[in-house]
Amino acid sequence: MAYSIVVLVKQVPDLNAVRVDKASGKPLLGDQLVLGAADAIAVEAALQLKEAHGGEVTVVSAGPPSVKDALQRALAMGADRALLAPIDQANALDTLALSRVLAGVLSGLTFDILITGQNSDDYESGQVPAQVAELLGLPQVSWVTKLVAVDGGLAIERDTEDGKQQVIAATPVVIMAADGLNEPRYPSLKGIMAAKKKPLETVEVAAVSATTDITWSDPAAPQKPPAGIIVQDKPAAEAVAELVAWLRTKNLA
């Protein structure tokens, strides 16, 4: 059975270029933007299903024009076409408002499987896939670590708090890909060249503005308490005595 598969992807800051401001604990994001790691896993899952059973893979994202770079990456991996829902400040929306935009785009598509990453690299809320599934009236399976097509649907293995769970899901269904599902491929030179000729369409979306139905704080690194003491600018004998006294309070001497 050939599958029509849609993959939701997000463009995020490159985590390898993120630094932390020591004074505030706030992340200092670099200018480099990339396809999210979990979304690359989702794209790979779609491509493997397509290669095994035939079909078509469409990638969909919402954001500013720069998101085309992330969509081009997915096309270079092997996706067939891409759709961009233009939103200037996607992260300024709460997740439900963003989900409504994406659901509006997806409602105009016919597909058997919708695959997303479990979490985005930046805010890691994990809310958008479940909200989109609810808005579209589709079942969803989260934390998927194994995905195989079988007669009547998909055989799925998912992580739970106390082990693994086996699920058989009929299509259409929303799949949330977790780490360990696969190892995303790197685009080949041939794939990169072919991506330039694949359709990448900007779709119209209804006007949307920032809302506060769901809010979250800005990410920040927690303050770490000192791991020990520093003894300096003291005579050696006094420094040794102070250090030994501290070790005894920790039952280390």
Image: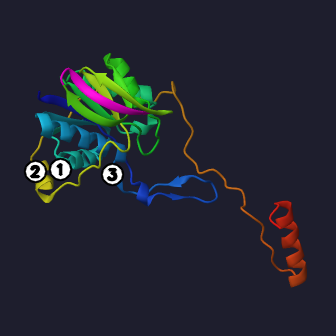
Looking at the rendered structure, the kind of residue marked 1 is: Ala
User: Mark 1, residues whose alpha carbon is within 10 Å: few (<14), some, or many (≥20)?
Assistant: many
- Quadrant that contains the C terminus: bottom right
Q: Is residue 207 visible?
A: no
Residue toward you, 204 or 55: 55
Question: Quick one: label 3 or label 1, which is nearer the N terminus?
Answer: 3
Residue 131 higher or lower than 25, as above or below: above
Q: Residue at x 21, y 30 (%)?
A: 149
Q: Quadrant of residue 41?
A: top left
Indicate yes or no whether the magenta region holds residue 153: yes
Direction from residue 94 to residue 248 in the image, left or right: right
Q: Secondary structure at mark 3?
A: strand
Disc 2 target residue: 194
Question: Quick one: label 2 or label 1, which is nearer the N terminus?
Answer: 1
Q: Is residue 10 visible?
A: yes
Residue 76 - label: 1
Residue 34 - label: 3
